[in-house]
Structure formats: C-alpha cells, structure tokens
Image (tube, coloured by chain):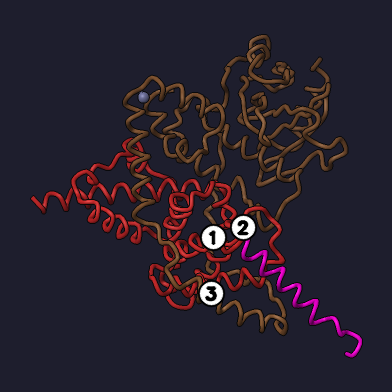
Chain colours: A brown, B red
C-alpha cells in the first residue's frame, strides 16, 4: 500500500471500519512510514479536540425535570393507548439512483472512490435494531456488503491469478478452510483471484470470478455457518443476486449483479468441476 | 368490572418493571441523548425540550425495546423527536441538500487530515470556531458527524439510527469531514493573518 492510498483510507481506518485485509496492509505501512504515522497522529489529535470542544452533556437539572415528568407520565400512561412512534416525514428525499457499473480492474482506489461510494449508497438498507432481521437475512446482508466492498479496485483480490494452482495454495495457512479454487474459463467464468474477507465475525475466503463485465464473488464458509435446510437458496438483495449451495462440507455463496440464471449456470459449472 | 380486582396491582408491577428497565438501560444515555438533540436543534433550551420528549417516549415504548443497544435505540427516538420539532419550528433546516459524489477537489482534501490553525489559535478561540463551523454544516452531514465523532457509533449503528443505507452514511461522513476541515483551514488562516 502506498502513502496516497493510505491517506484516503485513514479516516475509515481510525473509525475502525476497514476490513481485515485493509487493516493489515495499513498497519504494515504505518509501522515503517514516519510521514503516515504523523498523519495518523494528527488525525487522532483533531478528533480529540472535536470531542473535547463539541460535546454537550445533559445540563444540571434536566435529569430531575425528567424524573418529575416521568412521574406524571406514569399516572397518565394507563389511560393512553400506545400509538406507534410517529415516523417523521421530512426524512431526506431518496438518493438519486446512480447507474451501477463495475470498475475496471486496474483502476486506482483514489480515482474509484466516488463511484464506489455511489455503489455503496444503495447496496444496503439496514435497520438492525428496529427491524431485527433473522440470521439468514443478516448473513445475506453481510455478504452483499462484502461484495460491494470488494469492488474497491484495490481490494478485489489479494492474490491475482487465473491459475487455480496459484490461488488455492495462497490461502494455505491464512485461513482454516481450503476453498475449492477452480478455473471455469471454458464455461465462461474466468477465475481472477482470491481474497481474505471477514463475514459473520470470521475470516473467510472469497474467490473472484468474472463473467463478461460482471464480477462474481464466491464466499466460502464452513458448513456450520448456515443451517442445512435454510431457505431460500436463491435470493436477491438491493439489486444483487445471491445463490447458496453446500459442497464437500462447505457452504458456498455466489453474489453478483449478474442475472439469476448466470449464477445458476455458475453454480452448476462449479459443482460439476470442483473435486 | 367486578372480576378484576388485581388489575391495578398488575399495572403497578408492570410500571415498576418498566421503570427499572428504563433506569438501567436508557437513563445512562441521557448525555448522549442531549448531545444529539443539541446538535440537531442547534439551541440549548430546545435541546432540553427535545431530550425530555424523547425520553418520555422511550419510557412509554420501553416494552418495544428488545435489542442489546439501548443507546442506538434511544438516539433513534431522539432523532425522530428532533426532526418533528424542526418540522414544527424550523422547517427550512430540513431543506434537502443535493448529494453528489465527492469531486476531485474534495478528495484531494482527504490527503492532509492535519489542520494546523489549532497550533496558532488559543484553545478557547479554536473551540468556539469549531462549534461555529460544525453548526454551519448542513443537517444531514452534521448528524452523521456528531454520531461518529462525538457518540463514536459504528457506521452500522449510524445507519440504523438514521435509517440510511450504510453507503450513504459513509459518503455523508466523508463529505462532512472534508467540508469541516476545509472551512477550518480557511477560517483559521484568515483569523491568524488578521491578528498579525
Ligand atoms: Zn506512508
């Protein structure tokens, strides 16, 4: 990772929101680069100043007023019919829908930032606390998030190779599971490489394929990650299709904005070719 | 009805339970609630009214809270209360802000995260300037900045509180930071050169 790339990720890193691979690369660079280390310190100082200058704790007396008001509220609550919390109308108008296009693979992360941000804009629409999606939906949401994140050109692959004999060994020692990295170029799905990713709190392997202009991310999880009978196997979320199948003690997910039938075709080819 | 002599007792027990849960999980976040209300309304007394209203709502709906993160839950309610309040009293604040992708000039601002005027201005002056500049940020940018920098919520939590896609949270946060830093550098340099 170079200084410029690191600078562009520094805010997100200090927020603790870079993924596992990015974090490792950043920390490696910070250990050796005095200039970036100083930049990171300056950012930390700036944030400390904001926290110190701009925080408004509850003023004295508010707690007492509140307790008095609560006493009154308790006396009234019995005759009130609980109405749902009024959702205020003036939430901002929805985002203009930006045409979703894949980045060219060689493009720099800096140059790609704007479009990546645009991609992320509608990738996820979560309301974790209020809607409490079930575990399956939550996992699907995480997978889509990881897929979108991987579109950052700098992070699509950690090992770039169309050679399955390069990709598969690369994961050895880096991760517990051995992902079946196979080339499916003959069937129209070219292996681009592999990547470490982070799903459901665990390091995991992602294989990256390309089909025409579409990127397919294949996430390889241990079988226990999903109940065997979990439905549905195919789903779509925010314009991305997901397809899941089990194979040799692993659960595989393929995610892409390619059509559902493309994913079906991929899964078939994968199942037939994989050992 | 004559056959319900135990109802008041049951209600009393229920309220005691609600009060206990409220005191344990919600009340500890009073400062956070007030801080957010203060930044969304922009005024000290309005912030107190909004905070109080939000906490009363939180108490009333405490049965609906089953999650583990009471702070994010409370901040969601505070935000709703603040937006209702703004809608009634200062609707112009809610005017939409056009959102476009970051342009190249804004991106280049990301390279230097170290605003220098702090070294030159007195602490007190620097803090006052910072408050002024944060208040000048458009509401959608200000709120994500406050939730991140002051409440230290994760992107995911901010997305939940604001009911926004996580990507929107990220782009608004990036933009809020760049605008704030740019204004800070500009104003800080202006003020130091006037002072000389
Ligand atoms: Zn460096």
The answer to whether A161 appears left or right of A35 in the picture is: right
The residue at the far right in this view is: B3
Residue A264, above or below B138: above
* Residue pictured at 52% horizontal, 32% vertical: A152
Q: Picture coordinates of residue A230 (x, y %)? A: 84, 40
Residue closest to the eye, B83 or A53:
A53
Mark 2 CB lies closer than 8 A to ligand 1:
no
Residue A173, above or below A51: above
Callout 3: chain: A
Q: Label 3: which residue?
A: A66
Q: Are marks 2 and 3 on the same chain?
A: no
* Residue pictured at 43% horizontal, 49% vertical: B149
Q: From mark 2 to mark 3, how far is it between C-alphas? A: 18 Å
Q: Magenta residues?
A: B1-24
Magenta span dominant secondary structure? helix
Q: Label 1: which residue?
A: B29
Find numbered disc 3 in the image and state the secondary structure of the residue it sits on.
Answer: helix
Pointer 2 and pointer 1: residues touching (CB < 8 Å)?
yes
* Residue pictured at 76% horizontal, 29% vertical: A252
């Amino acid at each position: 990772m170079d200084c410029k790339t690191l600078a562009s990720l520094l805010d997100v890193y200090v927020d603790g929101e870079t993924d596992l691979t990015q974090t490792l690369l950043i920390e490696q660079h910070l250990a050796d680069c005095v200039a970036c280390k100083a930049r990171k310190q300056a950012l930390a100082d700036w944030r400390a100043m904001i926290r110190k200058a701009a925080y408004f704790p509850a003023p004295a007396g508010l707690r007492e007023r509140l307790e008095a008001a609560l006493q009154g509220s308790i006396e009234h609550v019995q005759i009130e019919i609980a109405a749902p919390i009024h959702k205020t109308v003036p939430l901002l108008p929805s985002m203009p829908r930006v045409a979703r296009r894949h980045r060219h693979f060689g493009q720099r992360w800096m140059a790609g930032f704007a479009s990546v941000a645009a991609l992320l804009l509608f990738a996820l629409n979560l309301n974790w606390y209020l809607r409490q999606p079930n575990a399956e939906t939550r996992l699907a949401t995480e997978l889509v998030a990881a897929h979108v994140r991987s579109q950052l050109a700098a992070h699509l692959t950690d090992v770039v190779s169309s050679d399955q004999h390069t990709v598969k060994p690369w994961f050895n020692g880096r991760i517990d599971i051995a992902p079946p990295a196979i080339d499916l170029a003959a069937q129209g799905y070219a292996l681009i490489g592999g990547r470490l990713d982070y799903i459901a709190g665990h390091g995991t392997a992602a294989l990256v394929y390309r089909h025409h202009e579409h990127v397919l991310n294949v996430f390889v999880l241990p079988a226990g990650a999903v109940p065997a009978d979990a439905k549905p196997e195919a789903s779509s979320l925010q314009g991305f299709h997901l397809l899941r199948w089990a194979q040799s003690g692993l659960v595989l997910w393929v995610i892409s904005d390619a059509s559902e039938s493309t994913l079906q075709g991929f899964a078939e080819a994968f199942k037939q070719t994989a050992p | 009805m004559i056959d319900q002599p135990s109802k008041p007792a049951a209600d009393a027990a229920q309220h005691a339970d609600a009060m206990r849960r409220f005191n344990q999980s919600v009340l500890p976040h009073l400062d956070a609630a007030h801080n957010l209300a203060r930044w969304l309304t922009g005024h000290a007394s309005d912030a107190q009214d909004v905070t109080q209203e939000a906490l009363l709502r939180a108490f009333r709906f405490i049965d609906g809270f089953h999650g583990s993160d009471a702070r994010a839950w409370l901040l969601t309610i505070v935000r709703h209360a603040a937006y209702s309040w703004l809608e009634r009293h200062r609707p112009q604040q809610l005017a939409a802000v056009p959102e476009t992708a970051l342009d190249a000039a804004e991106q280049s601002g990301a390279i230097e995260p170290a605003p220098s005027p702090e070294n030159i201005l007195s602490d007190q002056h620097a803090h006052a300037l910072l408050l002024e500049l944060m208040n000048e940020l458009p509401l959608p940018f200000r709120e994500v900045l406050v939730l991140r920098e002051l409440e230290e919520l994760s992107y995911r939590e901010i997305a939940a509180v604001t009911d926004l896609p996580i990507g929107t949270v990220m782009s608004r946060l990036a933009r809020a930071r760049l605008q704030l830093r740019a204004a800070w550098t500009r104003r800080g340099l202006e003020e130091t050169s006037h002072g000389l």
